[in-house]
Amino acid sequence: MLARVWRKKHDRRNAFRVLIDYVTRAEAEREPEVESLTNCLSLDTAHAEMLAVAHRSALVRGPALHIVISWREGEQPETRQALEAGRAALDALGMPPEQHQYVIAIHRDTDNVHLHVVVNRVSLVTGRAVHPGLSHLKLDRCMRGLELAQGWQRDRGPYVVVEREGQPVVERSLVRGPQQHRMPARARDLEVFGGMESVLTYARGAPLRDALAALDAPGAMWQDVHEALARHGLELRLKGRGLAVCVKDDVGLTPVKASSVHPRLAHGRLETALGAWVEPSRIIRVLDARRRYIEREVGELPSDLGEEHAQMRAQLRVRYNIESAQARSALETAQTNLRRHHKAEHQAMLKRHREVRERIRASALPGAERKAASSVAAFTRARELELLFERQIGERAALGKPQSWREWVEMLAARGDEAAILQLCAWARRHPRGRTVQPQPRNWFASVGAQDIDPLPPAKAQVMQNWIWRVDTTTGNVDYERRGERQFTDEGYRIAFGSHDAQLDVMLAGLLLARQKFGRHIDVGGNEHFLERTAMLAALYHVDVRFGDPRLEARRQVLVNERDERERWMREKRERDWLDREPGSVGQTGDSRPQSQRVASQVPGGGADLDPEHGHTTAPER
């Protein structure tokens, strides 16, 4: 379990409202999957109650405190256990739940179940604010205790569980340096809460291995280390009295301490091994990197395909930033012009009604009639202004707003854009929010071994040109439809059929798509009827595949041999028919039967036919 105080600046007057709306997802379009609890009168009035108590302390600044507690992936705490963890965290920070107002929300729609606690630092009893210093140490000690009490897997942190006289005890860890694998808070937050690989994790992978190999080489020099890091898009730079590992092409990313990547990369130890500090040469500075740090998922395999997909997603984000900036600029221009036009309309209407009032005042009407005319003019003015404001509000709303990153990606994915589909798949793996659990398909074609394959963009699916396809904007999967019904789905690592008894033409299309995606080696899953028809289709239509199931592959080989034998005898039949049509060739065989019967009698099985519906041979009627 991990916990931390999430520090974010909010306006003092609306901090409670903003945080409570965020953790309870009050503005969600659909019913949020959040379990919430508060010791205030209600969730709707919690922010007002907290603000009223906070006003009792004249010196407090930022009375709202936001705590986040996260469990490991796969751990599913009960509601009782989650609430116990939230209250224990408040006790650890010196804010007993009985004396402080709080709102607790449990989120279960991500890979890691996590808990949000919004608490008022001002006490209900004393009216004084609590200042929870060293909150990261207090919370980490509390988490170790909760792991022991509730039986969760232990996470690394400043505190560890040790055995003392046969009893588990929580103590401050005395281990320092690389054995503890410490990670800065911002990098840890990026990976735990954002699911993205940090610069530190990236540098500790292949770049570190190459840098240490360069250090261990005989006659190692500073330029060797610089070159090893430069091939991965990283660079060593002086920062204060030490060294930092920076991303070469992105100055906006925070550099990491070289010693946090590995102790051997510390400034002092490198100077001891290589001599005084030397800047990287100009050739190394302009060296093309084989790999670069880009936002990729934590645990994503550093394969060539994964690197290519990560690059495509990064380029997609660049495209969005450009188009979004252009859309915002166009929207600001349109809003300025519309605002100017609306102002002119408003002023023109006011001027017109002012002239009407002046004419009424200057008229020779009796007092009662002039007063009545003024009332009618005032009513007409109010009504026309109301209609004007309603129309102007509609015109401003019609301008719309630039699409968000998610909306823009979903729009491109619906058009079949490959990078957008990859981005949807990455989101689905990282944050499975709102995904409904689909029943496991009984029939499917899958890759042998590889599980990191994304759906094939419909434009690249050569055999699916005449099919109707739709992209699921939640998962990135591609559904292929015919006759108004979904026939099968490209889920990336497999082709899953929606029907338990798919038609032969649908199965053949799915098999050819699997051959294009996965190559020759394919796994097949399903009932015996589906397996038999798959082997039959592969043999009948000469599909160059090999099945991972030995029994199914053996059956395919049998059908291929039968097909080859049948085609061989059919070729011989055509040759004999051609000879029979030549002059003087009739009767040379000494058989008075028709040529077709003579050939059929020589074919193994008596001219048996291959039944495409059931995948086996049937004897012809005699």
Image: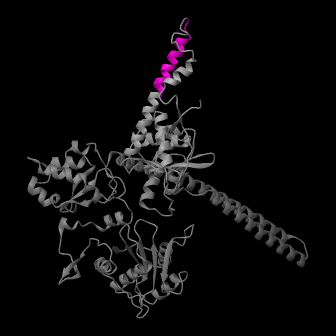
> Which one is in front, 345 or 599?
599
Residue 581 in magenta?
yes
- The residue positioned 39% from the left and 45% from the top of the image is 551
User: Could you tell whether 311 is left or right of 172 in the image?
Assistant: right
- The residue positioned 19% from the left and 64% from the top of the image is 178
> Which one is in front, 411 or 326?
411
- The residue positioned 54% from the left and 33% from the top of the image is 619
> Which one is in front, 349 or 215?
215
The answer to whether residue 262 of the structure is visible from this angle is yes
Residue 380 pos. (x, y %): 80, 69
Range drawn in magenta: 566-583
Residue 72 in magenta?
no
The answer to whether residue 548 of the structure is visible from this angle is no
User: Could you tell whether 390 is left or right of 598 in the image?
Assistant: right
Residue 454 pos. (x, y %): 43, 49
> Which one is in front, 589 or 485?
589
Residue 462 pos. (x, y %): 50, 37
The number of numbered badges drawn on the structure is: 0
Scheme of image coloration = one colour
Q: Is residue 312 above or below residue 14?
A: above
Q: Is residue 113 above or below residue 604?
A: below
- Seen as rendered, the residue at the extreme top is 584
Quarter containing the N terminus: bottom left
Residue 114 pos. (x, y %): 41, 72
